[in-house]
Amino acid sequence: MTIDFDTLNHVKQLRRVDLRPPEKLVQQILRSGENALTPLLELATSVDLLDEDPPDCYGPIHAVRLLGELRSLQMIEPLIRVFDPYLIEAEANTPPSIWSDDVPQMIGRIGEPAVAPLRALADDPTLTIDQRAAVLQALACTIGADESLRPAIIAELRERLAASEDRALNAHIVMALSTARAQEAYSEVMARYRAGMIETDIAPAATVRQLLYTSQRLKCVVHPFFERYESHGPVPPQLEA
């Protein structure tokens, strides 16, 4: 196996470029194509860095976003398997929160080819509830890349909700339906709330009720690379609200 040392060096630089990488570096990495996948995945899944001081804490975010540009199926499972409660519950606008918001969207950018592996992961008994939550969000986000997937993805999420007796899993299913703005599922979602079958600490009914009709998250899936930085951060700590 030939090691592309130029690409390795370019990816390593992502840990030293602070809030957003320069355009020249981004283009150098993207031109490497498949040669960039392994080093980008290594950095993107180094989630311990998210708690480091800047600029190290931004490296995994840059790497995840570049993986979203490459749209490789190889990135799906490694990214999903590093999710944990800390990342899911991180304070908004912090590096862990930005990373955990980005991952399902970056996987969703793959579109239809991502659906089968995501379905398989959704039924994988070795995944934690937080990892399955990320899978369900990624499934919903594929619609943002390919609107023709909407009927099948919404139908699958509705079927999963009807079949599940797990209150926590049901909460994550309705959050995925909310991401997809699945108004057609409103009645059955609310029925599951009335039956006490959704963990409201994870998915408050009022939040879900609103998002089923107003969520704009699917539009974020296809944000151009640098527009994502403008819309989703990170921002300098002194500017955080």
Image (spheres, rainbow, N blue to C red):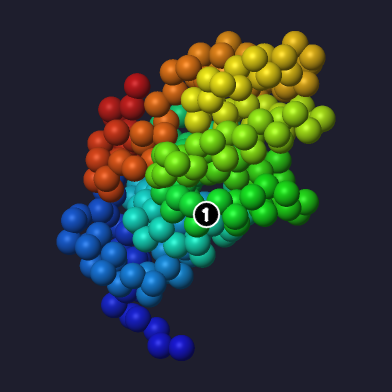
Q: Count all numbered tags in the image, as a single digit.
A: 1
Q: Is residue 50 visible?
A: no
Local packing at callout 1 (Cα closer than 10 Å; few below 14, some 14-19, many 20+) is many
The answer to whether residue 110 is above or below residue 182 is below
Residue at the right extreme? 165
51 displayed left or right of 153: left
**Disc 1 residue type (three-letter):** Ala
State the image coordinates of residue 86 (x, y, percent, origin top left): 60, 39
Q: Is residue 196 visible?
A: yes
At horizontal 65% and vertical 15% (from top left) the residue drawn is 187
State the image coordinates of residue 227 (x, y, percent, origin top left): 25, 40
Image quadrant containing the C terminus: top left
Quadrant in which residue 145 is drawn: top left
At horizontal 71% and vertical 30% (from top left) the residue drawn is 161
Quick one: SS at disc 1?
A: helix
The answer to whether residue 88 is above or below residue 214 is below
Question: Residue under circle 1?
Answer: 114
State the image coordinates of residue 114 (x, y, percent, origin top left): 52, 54
